[in-house]
Amino acid sequence: MSEISKKKQASKTIIKKCHCCGQILESSVEMSKCVSCGKSFLPLSYFDKIHGNEKYKFSELFSPSDEIYEEDLIKGLYVLW
Ligand SMILES: [Zn+2]
């Protein structure tokens, strides 16, 4: 099995509920906006990331699911599956 397919099998799904319209979103990478209402989202742990990594562009702050842990989630809005 190649490294790519191993990583793909191990990846988790991020399930997020939009705090504006209630749409449920699923992705392997953090969503930057709601597909239903267009509301823009901040990346998880946004303030920790911008204070430690000012050299990164905003779009690079959205993490793949493998880099996110339960303690990073906002309870009631996010689930890792
Ligand atoms: Zn929405």
Image: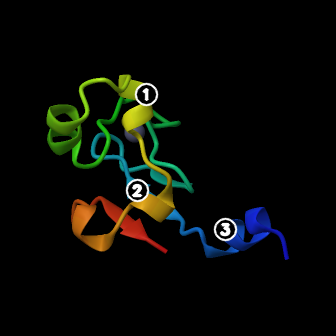
Callout in the foreground (1, 3): 3
Task: Check disc 3 and give the amino acid type.
Answer: Lys
Residue at the farthest right position: 1
Give the Cα distance between marks 2 and 3. 22 Å
- Sequence-wise first label, 1 or 2: 2
Question: Viewer-proximal residue, 76 or 44?
Answer: 44
**Residue 6, located in which quarter of the rendered image?**
bottom right
Task: Check disc 2 and give the amino acid type.
Answer: Lys
Q: 32 left or right of 51?
A: right
Do residues under tags 1 and 2 come within 8 Å of each other at their CB atoms?
A: no
**Residue 20, located in which quarter of the rendered image?**
top left
Is residue 63 depicted above or below 73 in this figure? Answer: above
Residue where numbered disc 2 is placed: 16
Q: Quadrant of the N terminus?
A: bottom right
Seen at 22% across and 48% down, the residue is 45
Task: Classify 10 Å Cα crowding around label 2: few (below 14), some (14-19), many (20 and above).
Answer: many
Dot 1: element: helix
Residue where numbered disc 1 is placed: 59
The x and y percentages for residue 5 are 78, 68
Task: Classify 10 Å Cα crowding around label 3: few (below 14), some (14-19), many (20 and above).
Answer: few
Callout in the foreground (1, 2): 1
Task: Classify 10 Å Cα crowding around label 1: few (below 14), some (14-19), many (20 and above).
Answer: few
Task: Check disc 1 and give the amino acid type.
Answer: Ser
Do residues under tags 2 and 3 come within 8 Å of each other at their CB atoms?
A: no
**Residue 38, located in which quarter of the rendered image?**
top left
Seen at 14% across and 34% down, the residue is 51
Which mark is on residue 7? 3
Give the Cα distance between marks 1 and 2. 18 Å
Dot 3: element: helix
Question: Viewer-proximal residue, 21 or 51?
Answer: 51
Quadrant hosting ligand 1: top left
Give the Cα distance between marks 1 and 3. 22 Å
